[in-house]
Image: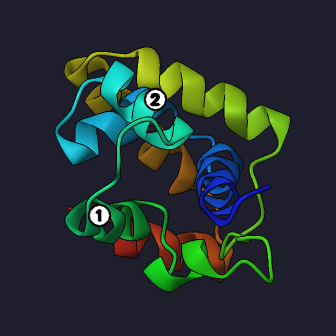
């Protein structure tokens, strides 16, 4: 496997660990999904600016993509199946439905008294 293939495998692995679609990253880069897929396959080069954006979106240091001595690992554990289902559901909603879902979840979570949940809700509050 070439160094370029290792770098692109790090990118793909981290994207999948984060349960993000190629479409999602394409939107963040301002390209269409086909173009992003070609970038991830190494058919089109990824610019320096795009690597910076990918690092931000994937919550990782950009240099970790290029470290061939180790596999890129996410800062948090990969989502479990239930989280993937919720994420897929959320992504299938339009903006108004997403707003309704988040509002409903906030109302349900207000009944939970655990400190960590309350702290997270405060951080997420608009």
Question: Residue 17, percent across and down?
Answer: 71, 51
Question: Residue 27, percent across and down?
Answer: 25, 36
The quarter of the image holding the C terminus is bottom left
In front of the other: 58 or 31: 31
In front of the other: 71 or 6: 6
113 above or below 10? below
Q: Crowding at label 2, few (<14), some or many (≥20) Cα neighbours within 10 Å?
A: some
Q: Crowding at label 1, few (<14), some or many (≥20) Cα neighbours within 10 Å?
A: some
60 above or below 77? below
Left or right: where 126 falls relative to 43: left
State the residue position of label 2. 37
Q: Measure the alpha-carbon separation of dots 2 and 1.
A: 16 Å
The quarter holding residue 10 reads bottom right
State the residue position of label 1. 53
Please give the label number shown on residue 69. Answer: none
Q: Is residue 103 at least partly visible in the picture?
A: no
Left or right: where 87 falls relative to 46: right
Q: Residue at x 70, y 34 (%)?
A: 84
107 above or below 100? below
Left or right: where 20 falls relative to 17: left
Which secondary structure lies at badge 2? Answer: helix
The quarter of the image holding the N terminus is bottom right
Question: Residue 30, percent across and down?
Answer: 16, 39
Q: Residue at x 71, y 59 (%)?
A: 2
Q: Which residue is drawn at 64% across and 56% down?
A: 14
The quarter holding residue 38 reads top left
Between tags 2 and 1, which lies in front? Answer: 2
């Amino acid at each position: 496997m070439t160094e370029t293939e290792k770098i692109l495998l790090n990118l793909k692995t981290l994207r999948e660990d984060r349960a993000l679609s190629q479409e999602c990253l394409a939107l963040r880069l301002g390209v269409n999904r086909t173009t992003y897929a070609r970038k991830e396959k190494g058919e089109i080069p990824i610019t320096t600016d795009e690597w910076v954006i990918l690092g931000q979106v994937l919550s990782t240091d950009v240099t970790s993509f290029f470290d061939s001595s180790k596999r890129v690992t996410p800062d948090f554990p990969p989502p479990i199946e239930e989280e993937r289902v919720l994420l897929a559901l959320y992504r299938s909603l339009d903006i108004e439905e997403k707003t309704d879902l988040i509002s409903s979840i906030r109302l349900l979570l207000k009944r939970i008294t655990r400190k960590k949940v309350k702290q997270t809700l405060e951080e997420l509050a608009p």
